[in-house]
Image: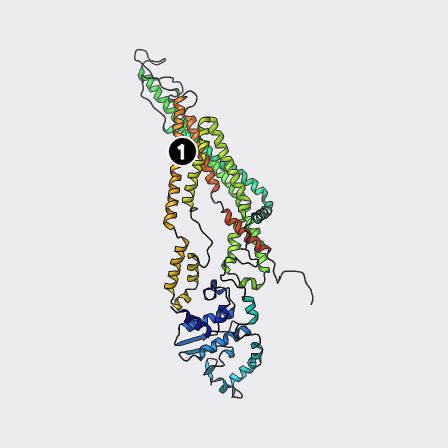
């Protein structure tokens, strides 16, 4: 690892020290993904400084200034001259721009794969009809040097570039978080968020028929859950159908007996009419109980088949309506964003990476539907599921439903803790930048050749380790709190269910003639399953905070005004 003094010495030799010191964080400045924060000349000089600090025996410069304009070439060329003056290395320069090789000790002119001339600049210029001399005259190199030097200051930095770079930020926000009107510079104010939400709803106004169709499907999909609770209650009744011993010496509740039987008490000397003995009476009872179990099982089967059919129809309408509306909305937003992109001037793209731009077109545009179709779907499903479940529960056993409503807040706390555990919502994901663990990994992998050439693998590993420690400084404590909260949520759910079953059993024992076991089952399962409808409605829901930020980015991009609009019809024509 090089010392700070060695780094600065290499930067000075590469003519890069002066512009580095003009940055806010100087040598600690992050240049961004692939150096997007810097100009072409500055990138070249940094690359030269990295090569110098390795102190190689042989340095190969292949078209080192080919991608630069004439002004930036002059600044970089001064740095290359400094490098070639060093006598501890051999420098091989390959170039079409002859200014790059002008001060070389030996110049070889290659044509058609063969060396035509060899010598220093002065020696080759003395040849009247030499190929090198002819190339110099064609490029008019000598006549342009003075003009190029006029706009370059003492440190090799172009004056106009220095003014532009004086306000450069220390970090590049590759996700478009720029202060000059970029899509990610969203305001955190509620007014801005409301304005974006209203704008998104207006864009979705044309899809109102699809929203109506999806709402019909959402009603069916929501009602399915309390209906499922009713069918489940009947299934429990069938599976646990009581078959007492016959004959019986004790009276039994009427709900325990099939139709036509009021008691199983039978004595051989006086069997119930019209039976001759107790054996015939018990055979008739068993046959009646079997037929009743069979009929009830058929009804449960028919109920499940109807539930399956309603599920397919409801979800088909729901996903077709809201899905089609979301994709149409997505297409409108992407078309508008892409139309805005192709109007922007090239300089706008120099400050942003391809990844940040494609993310805005792909991910941000897809989140806009959370302001239009998603709230409608969630509201309709919740109302149709919970409202119907509560009404059914009150109709069949209102004291039990009343207790359940009072315990819903505690159940909701448990359900939220469970959902956070399964969906990972208890983990905080901050926006990643170059200092985050993810940012360090991405930057390292994208520039793996540079990392390997500088042998800084261990340094990048240490930086990644420190970033992990900074991101989660109290990892043990937060995990204990998270685990305790999740455990408390599960415990709350279990205690509430235990209270429900105790209260239902108490009501059945205290008031046997008012409510039956079937009433209790329908009341509890229709309400419990309707709460599952709330969870189903929340599935696939977009994070509201992320959606607000995405809406701000995408609408800022759409509203971005181009400084040079190629599609504009204004201005002078025929000039």
Residue 510's image quarter? Answer: top left
- Relative image position of residue 338 (x, y in whole percent): 57, 56
Asked if residue 404 can be seen in this view, the reply is: yes
Viewer can see residue 526? no
Number of numbered markers? 1
Q: Relative to 202, is 217 on the left or the right? A: left
Residue at 39% over, 31% down: 499
Q: Position of residue 97 (x, y in %)?
A: 51, 77
The residue lying furthest to the top in this view is 269
Pick the residue in front: 143 or 295.
143
Q: Can you say which quadrant of the picture contains the N terminus?
A: bottom left
Question: Label 1 neighbourhood size at 10 Å, few (<14), some (14-19), many (20+)?
Answer: some
Instruction: Pick whichever, 7 or 137, lies toward us.
Output: 7
Residue linked to disc 1 = 496
Please identify the quadrant where the C terminus is shown.
bottom right
Q: With respect to residue 225, does 351 lie above or below?
A: below
Q: Specify whether 418 is left or right of 39.
A: left
Against 382, residue 259 (above or below) is: above
Measuring from the top left, give residue 94's x and y in whole percent: 46, 77
Q: Is residue 388 left or right of residue 289?
A: right
Q: Pinpoint residue 103: horizontal percent, then vertical percent.
A: 48, 81
Q: Secondary structure at mark 1?
A: helix
């Amino acid at each position: 690892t090089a010392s700070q003094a060695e780094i600065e010495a290499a930067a000075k030799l590469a003519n890069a020290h002066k512009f580095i010191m003009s940055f806010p964080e100087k040598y600690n400045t992050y240049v961004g993904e692939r150096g997007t924060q810097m100009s072409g000349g500055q990138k070249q000089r940094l690359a030269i400084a990295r090569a110098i600090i390795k102190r190689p025996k042989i340095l190969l410069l292949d078209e080192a200034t080919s991608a630069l304009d004439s002004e930036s070439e002059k600044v970089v060329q001064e740095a290359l001259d400094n490098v070639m003056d060093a006598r501890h290395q051999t420098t091989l320069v390959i170039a079409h721009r002859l200014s790059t090789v002008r001060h070389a000790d030996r110049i070889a002119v290659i044509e058609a794969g063969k060396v035509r001339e060899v010598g220093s600049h002065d020696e080759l210029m003395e040849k009247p009809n030499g190929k090198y001399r002819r190339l110099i005259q064609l490029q008019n190199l000598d006549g342009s040097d003075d003009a190029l030097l006029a706009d370059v200051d003492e440190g090799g930095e172009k004056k106009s570039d220095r003014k532009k770079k004086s306000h450069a930020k220390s970090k590049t926000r590759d996700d478009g978080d720029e202060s000059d009107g970029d899509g990610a510079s969203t305001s955190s104010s509620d007014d801005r968020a409301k304005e974006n939400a209203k704008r998104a709803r207006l864009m979705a106004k044309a899809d109102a028929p699809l929203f109506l169709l999806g709402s019909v499907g959402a009603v069916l999909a929501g009602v399915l859950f309390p209906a499922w609770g009713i069918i489940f209650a009947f299934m429990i009744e069938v599976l646990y159908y009581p078959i007492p011993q016959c004959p019986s010496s004790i009276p039994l509740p009427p709900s325990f007996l099939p139709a036509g039987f009021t008691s199983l008490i039978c004595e051989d000397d006086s069997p119930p009419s019209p039976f001759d003995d107790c054996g015939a009476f018990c055979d008739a009872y068993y046959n009646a109980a079997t037929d009743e179990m069979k009929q009830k099982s058929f009804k449960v089967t028919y109920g499940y088949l109807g539930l399956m059919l309603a599920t397919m129809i409801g979800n088909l309408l729901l996903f077709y309506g809201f899905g089609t509306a979301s994709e149409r909305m997505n297409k409108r937003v992407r078309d508008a964003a892409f139309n805005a992109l192709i109007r922007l001037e090239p300089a706008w793209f120099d400050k942003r990476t391809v990844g940040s731009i494609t993310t805005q077109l792909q991910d941000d545009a897809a989140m806009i539907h959370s302001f239009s179709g998603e709230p409608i779907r969630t509201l309709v499903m919740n109302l149709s599921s919970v409202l119907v479940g509560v009404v059914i529960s009150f109709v069949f056993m209102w004291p039990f439903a009343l207790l359940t409503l009072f315990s819903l807040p505690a159940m909701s706390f448990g359900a939220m803790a469970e959902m956070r555990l399964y969906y990972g919502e208890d983990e905080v994901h901050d926006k990643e930048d170059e200092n985050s663990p993810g940012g360090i990994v991405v930057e390292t992998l994208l520039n793996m050749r540079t990392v390997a050439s500088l042998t800084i693998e261990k340094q990048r590993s240490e930086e990644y380790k420190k970033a992990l420690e900074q991101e989660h400084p109290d990892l043990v404590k937060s995990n204990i709190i998270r685990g305790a909260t999740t455990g408390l949520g599960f415990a709350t759910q279990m205690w509430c269910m235990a209270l429900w079953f105790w209260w239902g059993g108490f009501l059945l024992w205290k008031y046997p003639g008012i409510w039956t076991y079937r009433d209790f089952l329908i009341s509890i399962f229709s309400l419990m399953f309707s709460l599952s409808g709330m969870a189903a409605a929340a599935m696939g829901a977009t994070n509201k905070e992320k959606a607000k930020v995405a809406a701000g980015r995408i609408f800022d991009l759409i509203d971005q005004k181009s400084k040079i609009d190629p599609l504009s019809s204004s201005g002078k024509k025929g000039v």
